[in-house]
Image: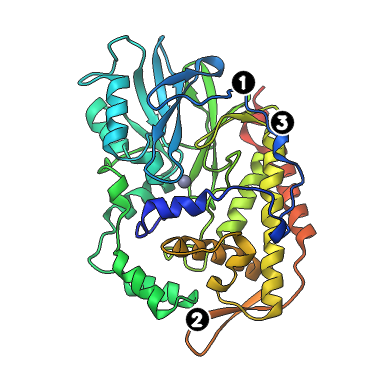
């Protein structure tokens, strides 16, 4: 979901979930191939069904109205038999609410067969497919919501950011990225402030999750790992004893998370943050079972992180090369990022991703921005892109994390 809330969610998801196939036309490296990942569960649960995976943890799916048709949610045993903390909620929709009502039962917290009793709600990040029903759970079941401070501030801010017209500074943002007058007109027509369409009104208060302290859930200690790049204040939850990682959208096995520059931080460098987050997760044990928000639970965290890092590092090379040929605006580098033509409202999300790559290279000193006569920002080649240096820097972050992660001191 776009954080500004203005483009339709289905289109934003369509881009976000572009498959990570080997992309010969982009010289995408695959330091490891997909066979390095192992999926212990061949079949996902049906919508509203709970499958028990390791250590009594429940895996369920809720529907999404997009090309990507599901989100995975997890139930972490929390207290007595049948009591669970829930990670994420699904998007606000009739279908998701109906599925939850069947699972949890109406007017109470226990379903007819006594299977599910929810104790609290933990959120990974502010995107509507993850916290769309947080307010509904708080109202209907009295659940306390636990989230990072940044997640909560973003969610509440976006929920209230509704305006009759697309703000001028947003139009300016896309103008700088190279939008034509026609593309700007389409943007204007799409309107502003659609985040709340997928998100029920949120409670005012939240229990802040502190990444420096473990979360006691049932008999287990989970550590929140805060990363950014896909979403500021994104939390993954790691249980070092049982080597389990609920990874949210920070690491997905088959699709690559959307990493975009948004008008809310128009000169930000989210790709650097996202890569840093991947490098930190690389410090987790190799046999960690990863419970992602999309696709299926898997083992093979290290090869998957290597793949994601490798692909992005390589794609950056393609972007640098395009700008070396001639100065480019963001909308002109799509061929270095996507195998298919970007059209319609996907255009906006692709622009965010393109800017993320350009800003990364700008920060590296590879590119410099120069406004042209129309006011669009063109990125001019300045120096060679040092892919190996980026990889080495990330490896150093991994080593630092291995030494300093809070759970390493706890045996
Ligand atoms: Zn997300």
Q: Regarding mark 2 in the picture, which secondary structure is present there?
A: loop
Q: Nearer the viewer, residue 226 or 15?
A: 15
Q: Regarding mark 3 in the picture, which secondary structure is present there?
A: loop
Q: Residues within 10 Å of mark 2 (few under 14, many from 20)?
A: many
Q: Are marks 2 and 1 in contact (CB under 8 Å)?
A: no
Instruction: Determine the image quadrant of residue 390.
Output: bottom right
| Precedes in sequence: disc 3 or disc 1 | 1
Q: Where is the C terminus found, in terms of image quarters? A: top right
Report x, y in % for residue 42: 58, 24
Decide if residue 282 is in sight here.
no
168 vs 150: above or below: below
| Precedes in sequence: disc 2 or disc 1 | 1
The residue drawn where x is 43% and y is 18% is: 78
Q: Nearer the viewer, residue 226 or 12?
A: 12
- In this rendering, position of residue 53 left or right of residue 138: right
Decide if residue 37 is in sight here.
yes
Q: Are marks 3 and 2 in contact (CB under 8 Å)?
A: no
Q: How is the image coloured?
A: rainbow
Q: CA distance from mark 3 to mark 2?
A: 45 Å
Q: Regarding mark 1 in the picture, which secondary structure is present there?
A: loop
Report x, y in % for residue 326: 67, 81
Q: Pointer 1: what residue?
A: 242
Q: Pointer 2: what residue?
A: 376
Q: Pointer 3: what residue?
A: 286
- Disc marking residue 100: none
Report x, y in % for residue 174: 44, 72
Instruction: Determine the image quadrant of residue 125.
Output: top left
The residue drawn where x is 46% and y is 43% is: 68
266 vs 49: above or below: below
Instruction: Determine the image quadrant of residue 254.
Output: top right
């Amino acid at each position: 979901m776009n954080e500004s809330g203005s483009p339709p969610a289905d289109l934003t998801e369509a881009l976000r979930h572009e498959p990570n196939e080997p992309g010969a036309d982009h010289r995408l490296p695959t330091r490891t191939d997909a066979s390095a990942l192992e999926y212990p569960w061949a079949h996902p649960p049906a919508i509203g069904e709970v499958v028990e995976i390791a250590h009594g943890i429940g895996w369920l799916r809720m529907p999404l109205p997009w090309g990507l048709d599901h989100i995975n949610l997890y139930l972490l045993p929390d207290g007595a038999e049948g009591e669970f903390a829930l990670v994420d909620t699904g998007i606000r929709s009739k279908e998701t609410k109906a599925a939850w009502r069947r699972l949890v039962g109406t007017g109470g917290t226990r379903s007819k067969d006594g299977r599910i009793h929810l104790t609290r709600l933990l959120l990974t990040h502010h995107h509507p497919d993850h916290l769309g029903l947080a307010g509904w759970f708080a109202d209907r079941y009295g659940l306390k919501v636990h989230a990072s401070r940044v997640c909560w501030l973003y969610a509440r801010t976006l929920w209230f950011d509704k305006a009759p017209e697309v703000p001028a500074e947003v139009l300016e943002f896309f103008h700088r990225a190279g939008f034509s007058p026609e593309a700007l007109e389409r943007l204007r027509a799409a309107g502003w402030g659609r985040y709340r369409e997928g998100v029920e009104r949120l409670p005012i208060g939240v229990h802040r999750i502190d990444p420096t302290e473990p979360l006691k859930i049932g008999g287990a200690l989970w550590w929140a790992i805060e990363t950014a790049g896909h979403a500021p204040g994104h939390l993954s939850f790691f249980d070092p004893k049982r080597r389990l990682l609920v990874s949210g959208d920070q690491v997905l096995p088959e699709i690559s998370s959307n990493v975009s520059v948004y008008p809310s931080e128009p000169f930000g460098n989210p790709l650097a943050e996202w890569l840093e987050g991947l490098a930190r997760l690389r410090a987790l044990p190799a046999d960690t079972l990863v419970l992602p928000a999309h696709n299926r639970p898997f083992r093979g965290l290290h090869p998957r992180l290597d793949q994601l890092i490798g692909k992005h590092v390589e794609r950056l090379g393609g972007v640098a090369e395009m700008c070396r040929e001639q100065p480019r605006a963001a909308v002109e580098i799509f061929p270095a990022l996507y195998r298919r033509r970007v059209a319609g409202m996907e255009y906006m999300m692709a622009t965010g991703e393109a800017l993320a790559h350009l800003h990364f290279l700008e920060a590296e000193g590879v590119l410099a921005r120069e406004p042209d006569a129309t006011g669009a920002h063109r990125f001019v080649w300045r120096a060679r892109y040092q892919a190996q240096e980026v990889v080495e820097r990330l490896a150093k972050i991994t080593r630092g994390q291995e030494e300093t992660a809070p759970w390493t001191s706890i045996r």
